Amino acid sequence: MKLRLSLASVLAALSFASPLAAQSNQTLPAGFDSVQGGAATSFPFNQLTAHKWQWHYANSNFAQSGPIRITEVYVRAVSVTQTVTAFDFPDLTVTLAAATTGYMTTQHDPVFANNLAPGAQVVRSGPWTGGPVTTPGGATSATWIPLGITTPFDFDPTSGADFIVQLEKCTSVATFGGSIDGRSSGAGLNGGNRYGDINSCSSASSTFSNNEYVPIVRIDWIPATAQFGNFCTAATTTNSCAPTIASTGAASASHATPFQLTVSSVEGQRSGLVFYGVNNTGFAPPPWGSGFLCVKPPLQRTGLQFSGGTIGACDGVLTLDWNAFHSAAIGQLGAPLSAGQTIYAQAWFQDPPNMKATATSDALLFTLAP
């Protein structure tokens, strides 16, 4: 049975992370995971005007020994005491790329396109909303805010190339209400610079730059050879549950052995289900329930199930042997499966006290073995 785009027919909640592809993270510039950079900027998320930016990070920030797959990019407030107010940017496009130039002002080209190596990837586009975002007391780093990447990007630090995050913010309804965090240092020591236009999101060239200042971002990544990876953003539920996805076993076209998807931190005593798609190319997740629809239609849903646990707690769990489900069904989306095919899975579950009555997990991509 194909899944239709209505909240009544689209149910489920899960999150996956394979032990074969443990997710890692780091900041750019490196070394600011648990400490603030302390250099503030209102650009671009506390400005109503259209902006275009290239945040250019030196290759020396990376210590990986091979290609990586970047699955999310985050920003944060400049201070642990700052609340990021509810924000609404109807049109935000983010492009990730290896750089053809160096990050310093004497190396970076004023023409935006000339800095992007072949293979530059639009990783998210469309509306970006969220907030308010606060930081728990006692924390030494402000809460990271995901940009909502929908298409992972492969980057090879061993190539020697720098890394660029390009942002095109074309419209703004409500801003952060404060600055984002950044780093400023001496010439050649900062590990990054920013170059932008503060009046247009479609400018071909930068008209504004800083010598040795760049916003601090966090990236989530897995080895590029890994066959599993999380992407997109999970909803926060009525009781502040954050559905966490995990997988065990091997996803395979032959369904040879179990491939178990497990969703923990689900609202207790709720109905839910897992659904999947087979092509996420160019998809910008729309808001859906209290989260996002992270998987591009057409969609296939699996059976409705019950989370168990306790009402009002985050101890509900949803499970699915994806190999068994697909082998037992006739005419399912994607059939016949083939080795190397990529599947995109997400979940939905009921959350009646929530204003929108439903919640979604983040999403998982996995590539089928023979």
Image (spheres, helix red, strand yellow):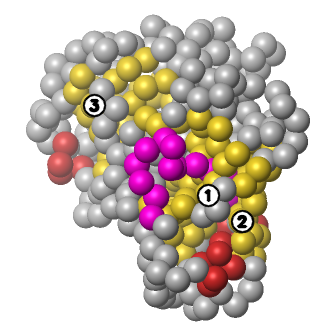
Badge 2 or badge 3: first in the primary sequence: 3
Position in image of residue 264 (x %, y %): 78, 48
Position in image of residue 337 (x %, y %): 49, 85
Q: Which amino acid does label 2 sit on?
A: Leu
How far apart are labels 1 and 2 at the CA level? 8 Å
Q: In this view, does 12 lie above or below 250?
A: above
Q: What residue type is labelled 1?
A: Val
Q: Name the residue under label 2.
A: 320
Badge 3 or badge 1: first in the primary sequence: 3
Circle 3 residues within 10 Å: few <14, some 14–19, many ≥20:
some
How far apart are labels 3 and 1 at the CA level? 29 Å
Determine the residue located farthest toward the right in the rendered image. Answer: 310
Residue segment shown in magenta: 2-17
Q: Name the residue under label 1.
A: 274
Position in image of residue 9 (x %, y %): 50, 50
> Magenta: predominant secondary structure element?
loop
Q: Residue at x 25, y 64 (%)?
A: 118
Q: Is mark 1 on a helix, strand or loop?
A: strand
Position in image of residue 343 (x %, y %): 50, 69
Q: Which residue is drawn at 48% across and 14% down?
A: 86
Query: Does residue 15 belong to the magenta stretch?
Result: yes
Q: Between label 2 and label 3, give the one nearer the viewer.
A: 2
Q: Do the residues labelled 1 and 2 touch (CB within 8 Å)?
A: yes
Q: Mark 3 points at which residue?
A: 91
Badge 1 or badge 2: first in the primary sequence: 1
